[in-house]
């Protein structure tokens, strides 16, 4: 990039453009993002060969896009917007203040404007909001040769030509056909006879997560999107689906760590927004944890007579929490990937019981050796701690296994049944087991 | 499917085959997986039209694949294996016992056998282990017309023809060209002049995670894999990358919940294996938690004189743990997606300090109201708890922000710096802050 900047400073614009044209659009966007001087970014952007400018733009950071749109002429804005795929345009517009959106729409032709407006109205996270309209449509009466000729004429501006869509005069989707089939079939074949009539498609209002699941299940590269009358309105391509998979995974992780999910990158989120995302669950869990505290208060007499019992509370609470969140994490993930279904609840309980008996015995045994033989804790206290530990682990794992499935059945997102909530619940159970065992064994 | 089973029972095999041919291969595999009668599965499998049998096979469950291979004739085995894409064959063989692998390799021709053996030798999770060899290769001297003719002749057996690979006489990869370009360009153009010479490729030994990152960064559909001499040896397609993204996410989640990562589905993992995956970290964390217990022992005098202090331990520990794991989760995810880099450590500390001051004040304030005004706890104890709470939250968030980055710098997987470990560390800090504050304020 230094090289290119030098060329620009020497006003050797043509040479700079040639250098840029050799690079990948993603890399150009990445290089631009590292330049602090905004005017220089605009200068370089203007030098870009026209056919890749919109592509580079779609990969740039939002702040830089904004600055460029504000710095260039209306004609240039119109060029970029008309060259962008509709899904990239909509993504960009959705994050703009209203006056900017107006400025941009003013510079696009009437048809594009109507389409953009329609797209901006699809609900967030719906198939409609992530689809694009740059697809190839064919008629079923065409021969393969005519179809290929049609693709040659119209294909340049399409996001993908790998799958083509066969529609009737009312735009109703009747079949799909891959470019591979078109090339491999005899050129006189009629599309109707070779197209796939049994194909996967989604509705504009379907959730993007549902769409992503279909891509995974059927190993798709693109999927057609239709309205309620099965009229073709757009397609969704795999590159957008990968972003969605990452995004859904991030949101699940955030929920599992007791935060409000957010699509924003960490470093780009304001401190206030980060605090807002985190405070609600911290408050809820803090107040729930005071119930655990009340259990200790209830057993104050036990603690008063054997104050050393307090020393084992952290170990019990932590081990219970960890054992429980191991289980809940596996179940939440299994549910998200569709590997575990609600009807598997009994299998899960059986598995978790088995696992918890095994791990519980090992943990209790190791702990007993340490407490009684290494740290010379009295026999009765050692036994109390280890019995409590065993039952805590068993309960934690069973609760951790059941609650995510219960949440799913109750149509609540299983991801909230993760470590923090499970830990709070298990803590209370652990302390009740602990003090009750102590009361019985130590005869307090 | 009932319909098909009935047809089979009535020995109307041809009609059953027609019914099956209408269905998607993924759906046929899913339907087969629900049939308990193994013999019936083999029967249905044998009826499948030959051109989709291998495809259906690649989507079936491992147990059913095994049973089918054991039930059918050697010739049938050879047919399936020869029709499978090499990556699916290798995936299947990798999970087989050695004697089964021999049985299968015996039934393949020499070339395929040599290739399979080579594939089985690539390290797990390397690009070589997930690539396939069914790609279209072109010569740079070809015209577009010749290239298309070549694709027509050889394309049927290729996993994808969407991108073609241009190699020289030594199989060195010189360029790539999309089928789109071939169709849109003039048929007399020479490949050399229109191919892309600056393309993304990986080495057979590159890690699959690196490959997945390239797919995401450059919105790829497939990527060529070369050896150290840049000879083309295979390609990786996007459908396999999506599985890898899911798999890497699952492994990160498992590590974050203090488990040994495993690729096996939960319901298909034995209880013993599940217990093994979980016990090591449970033991490590249990023993670490006893250090926290030792802190309580050290302050036994404080606790002895004001035993009520014990009642606030769970709330302090839980809130600290939750606050810390919120931060560590965001940082671990940011590092995994490449949104946060090691050099951002100061930015992260600044952000976490800001967030923790905000959340800490709110939490301490709410807690003070509840303790002093609602539950009538004495002023000094309420103040002790709230001051400790505030500093615990601040420390937890800073520690949660720094440790994953420190791990990354020390070339350790940041995912292990998640909730469980952070919680254990924060617990100890929380108790030291708590008892020290109590000692000073309550003058014990």
Image (cartoon, coloured by chain):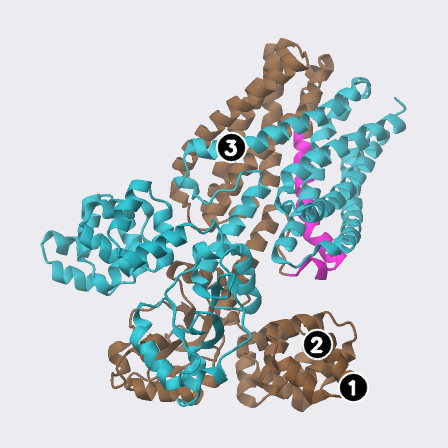
Chain colours: A cyan, B brown
Which chain letter goes with mark 3?
Answer: B
Task: Judge left or right: residue A99 versus residue A392.
Answer: left
Cα gap from disc 2 to disc 1, whole angstroms = 27 Å
Please give the residue where the numbered disc 2 appears in the rendered image: B66
Which part of the image, by quadrant, shows the C terminus of chain A?
top right
Judge the density around disc 3: few (<14), some (14-19), many (≥20) Cα neighbours within 10 Å: many
The earlier-in-sequence mark between 3 and 1 is 1
Res. B171 in view: no
* Residue extent of the magenta highlight: B264-292
Please state which of the two labelled residues, at mark 2 or mark 1, is closer to the viewer: 1
Task: Judge left or right: residue A19 versus residue B255.
Answer: left
Please give the residue where the numbered disc 1 appears in the rendered image: B10
Q: In percent of the image, x 53 and y 51: which residue is there?
A: A249
Position of residue B147 measured from the top left corner of the image (x, y, whole percent):
34, 85
The earlier-in-sequence mark between 2 and 1 is 1
**Based on the displayed image, in which of its 4 quarters is residue A70 positioned?**
top left
Please give the residue where the numbered disc 3 appears in the rendered image: B397
In the drawing, what numbered circle is on residue B139?
none
The earlier-in-sequence mark between 3 and 2 is 2
């Amino acid at each position: 990039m230094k090289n290119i900047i030098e060329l620009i400073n020497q006003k050797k614009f043509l040479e700079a453009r040639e250098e840029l044209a050799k690079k990948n659009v993603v890399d150009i966007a990445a290089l631009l993002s590292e330049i602090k001087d905004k005017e220089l970014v605009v200068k370089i952007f203007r030098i870009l060969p026209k056919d890749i400018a919109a592509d580079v733009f779609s990969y740039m950071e939002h702040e830089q896009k904004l600055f460029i749109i504000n710095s260039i002429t209306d004609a240039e804005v119109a060029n970029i917007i008309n060259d962008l795929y509709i899904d990239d345009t909509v993504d960009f517009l959705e994050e703009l203040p209203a006056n900017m959106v107006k400025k941009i729409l003013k510079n696009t032709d009437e048809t594009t404007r109507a389409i953009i407006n329609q797209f901006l109205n699809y609900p967030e996270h719906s198939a409609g909001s992530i689809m694009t309209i740059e697809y190839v449509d064919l008629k079923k009466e065409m021969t393969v040769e005519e179809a290929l000729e049609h693709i040659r004429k119209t294909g340049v501006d399409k996001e993908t030509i790998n799958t083509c869509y066969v529609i009737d005069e009312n735009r109703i989707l009747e079949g799909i056909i891959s470019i591979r089939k078109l090339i491999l079939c005899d050129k006189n074949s009629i599309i109707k006879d070779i197209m796939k009539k049994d194909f996967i498609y989604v509705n504009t209002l379907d959730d993007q997560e549902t769409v992503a699941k279909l891509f995974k299940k059927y190993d798709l590269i693109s999927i057609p999107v239709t309205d309620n009358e099965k009229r073709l309105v757009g397609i969704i391509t795999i590159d957008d689906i990968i972003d969605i998979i990452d995004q859904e995974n991030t949101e699940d992780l955030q929920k599992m760590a007791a935060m409000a999910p957010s699509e924003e990158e960490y470093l780009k989120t304001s401190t206030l927004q980060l605090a807002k995302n985190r405070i609600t669950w911290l408050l809820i869990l803090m107040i729930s944890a005071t119930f655990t505290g009340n259990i200790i208060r209830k057993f104050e007499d036990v603690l008063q007579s054997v104050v050393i019992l307090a020393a084992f509370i952290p170990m019990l609470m932590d081990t219970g929490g960890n054992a429980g969140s191991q289980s809940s994490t596996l179940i939440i993930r299994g549910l998200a990937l569709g590997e575990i279904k609600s009807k598997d609840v009994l299998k899960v309980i059986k598995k978790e019981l088995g696992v918890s008996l095994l791990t519980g015995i090992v943990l209790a045994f190791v702990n007993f050796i340490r407490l009684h033989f290494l740290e010379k804790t009295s026999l009765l206290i050692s036994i109390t701690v280890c019995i409590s530990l065993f039952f805590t682990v068993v309960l934690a794992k069973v609760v951790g296994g059941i609650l995510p499935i219960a949440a799913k059945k109750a149509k609540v997102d299983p991801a909230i049944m993760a470590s923090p909530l499970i830990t709070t619940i298990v803590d209370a159970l652990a302390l009740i087991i602990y003090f009750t065992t102590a009361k019985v064994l130590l005869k307090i």
